[in-house]
Image (cartoon, grey):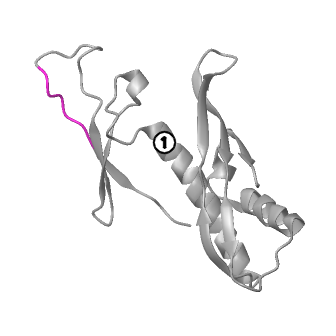
């Protein structure tokens, strides 16, 4: 149906190539020319000023959920004025002692247009359907929870 490509650039910047000294910094370049400075997470000798793959993973899940939610609302003529999320991913060891993102918790806050009376039950249904239809959520094993205040 579609392809999604990025370019990744990394280059050694030290005379040696040892685990403790090689740079984790690299660049992601997208088809529209946008570049993002990336690195490993700081706990894995990465640059705290760059985006790490785990953050990008959590961001992609949050973003996909939101985009699916907005599409569903638009189709149902439910007008959304704003959407915010404070998503959190948990990197832990699994039963095989491998590091994995075991869980991502989404905490969306949605403001609907004046006159849109969306019940708590309807809001939960919209988020449930969004999770079921999210391309990224359907592509991963990570447990994804949505907490609605």
- Quarter of the figure that contains the N terminus: bottom right
Q: Residue at x 68, y 67 (%)?
A: 110
Instruction: Give the residue furthest to the left.
Output: 15
From the viewer's side, name the closer residue of 56 and 30.
56
Circle 1 residues within 10 Å: few <14, some 14–19, many ≥20: some
Residue under the image location 80 percent in, 66 percent down: 123
Position of residue 129 measured from the top left corner of the image (x, y, whole percent): 79, 63
Q: Secondary structure at mark 1?
A: helix
The C terminus lies in quadrant = bottom right
Q: Is residue 51 left or right of residue 67?
A: left
Rendering coords of residue 72 (x, y %): 72, 74
Q: Position of residue 30 (x, y in %)?
A: 34, 58
Quarter of the image where one finds residue 70: bottom right
Q: Which picture quadrant has residue 116?
A: bottom right
Magenta includes 103? Answer: no
Q: Main secondary structure of the magenta part?
A: loop
The magenta segment is 9-14
Q: Nearer the viewer, residue 72 or 110?
A: 110
């Amino acid at each position: 149906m579609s392809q999604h490509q990025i370019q990744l650039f990394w280059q050694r910047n030290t005379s040696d190539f040892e685990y403790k000294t090689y740079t984790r910094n690299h660049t992601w370049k997208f088809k529209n020319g946008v570049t993002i400075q990336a690195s490993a997470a700081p706990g894995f000798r990465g640059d705290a000023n760059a985006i790490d793959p785990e953050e990008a993973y959590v961001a992609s899940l949050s973003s996909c959920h939101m985009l699916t939610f907005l599409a569903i609302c638009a189709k149902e003529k439910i007008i959304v004025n704003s959407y915010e999320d404070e998503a959190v991913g948990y990197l832990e060891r699994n039963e095989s002692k491998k590091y994995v993102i075991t869980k991502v918790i989404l905490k969306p806050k949605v403001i609907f247009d004046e006159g849109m009376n969306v019940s708590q039950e309807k809001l939960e249904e919209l988020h449930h359907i969004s999770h079921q239809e999210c391309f990224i959520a359907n592509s991963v094993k990570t447990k994804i929870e949505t907490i609605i205040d």
